[in-house]
Image (cartoon, rainbow, N blue to C red):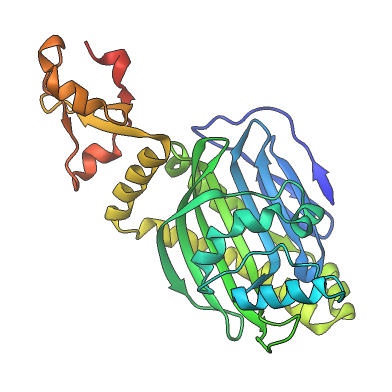
Amino acid sequence: LVIISGAGKVNSASLKLENYNGGSFTIERPKGWDLITAGNCSTFAFLIRDPSEPLRQVFYFGEVGPVYMSHEQKQIDWQYMQMGGYPVTWIEMPVVIPLTPATFLVQFQQIARTRIAQQFMPQCPRLENLQIISSSPCHSQIQGGSTELVRALFTEQGRVGEGLFMATVAPVIPFSGGPGGGIAYGFMITGVTAPKKEFSHLKGTLIKSAGSFSISQEYVNQCLKEQARTYAAIRRAGRTLSETSDIIMKGWEGRNRTHDIIAEKRSDAILGRERLYNPETGEVYEFENGFYDKYSLNKDIYEINNLRPLAESDYDLWMKAPLDGHRHLR
């Protein structure tokens, strides 16, 4: 495990990238951010995170798992251990049904809490309460695998983050009715995240950072000596992270605007908030849930007495940064 710390804080309006040479790899990281690596060859992973704001991060995991593909298999492994069998080291891992990248990401918080994950990288992103906004299939480079580009919201200590993720899942050992089967892995898990209100401004630089990852030929040769499968995986990581960043950016630029509104509504639901707007000025205000019901019964006591809920499909209003309602309401 390697940790490289940088000094200073990030200006949320603009991030400056600086080249970092890790010997076996190079990458452009935001200036002042921590860089953490773990694993090697096919299991190589990195996490780049702002020490002043954990929601700002870029990460890549070559392999994550194993996870279960059925509750029955997990029960078989548990009973096997109870009867005196060898420890199944991944028994803490969750069941991912159906086996899709989006469902895998929803379960990532459970994966990150396991002893396997904590031993591998204690700083592993938690992605708690992850909620899918959209997912779209992509070409999978792993035989039998499924790859998706996913947009999602998640929480960190009660605050909402937004992220774009690209992930592949594939079964590795089929269910056989005995212990040790019915497992799958996540491969090439790539993510860029930031606080919800910052994400649209920072995502371009974060995606560029992920796409700048490059592996030295010497490291590829070293992996080749170990085993062909490992070599193929690490070579693929070096070649495709650039392609992945392009897919992530194109996915964002070509997104359905309805998903932007869904993201705002989900964020409000997570935080327990609602939005109202003034039809005369177009200003949008933010209040705690349930405020409008009380307000509508006593509008006459307020100087601003014409606030209304936002229309379901009014894109411009939903995209406005809401003002603190109680501070501005008179």
131 vs 124, left or right, is left
114 vs 225, left or right, is left
Q: Is residue 283 visible?
A: no
Q: Quadrant of residue 44?
A: bottom right
Residue at left 38%, top 34%?
A: 272
118 vs 254, left or right, is right
Q: Quadrant of residue 71?
A: bottom right
Residue at left 32%, top 44%?
A: 265
Residue at left 79%, top 51%?
A: 21
Name above or below for residue 156 compared with residue 88: above
Q: Is residue 199 visible?
A: yes
277 vs 241, left or right, is left
Estimate the x, y position of residue 58 in percent, counting from the top left: 62, 50
Q: Out of 114 and 34, give the one closest to the viewer.
A: 114
Q: Quadrant of the C terminus?
A: top left
Estimate the x, y position of residue 214 in percent, counting from the top left: 71, 62
Estimate the x, y position of residue 52 in percent, counting from the top left: 64, 30
Q: Quadrant of residue 218?
A: bottom right
Name above or below for residue 9 compared with residue 208: above
Q: Out of 221 and 195, give the one closest to the viewer.
A: 195
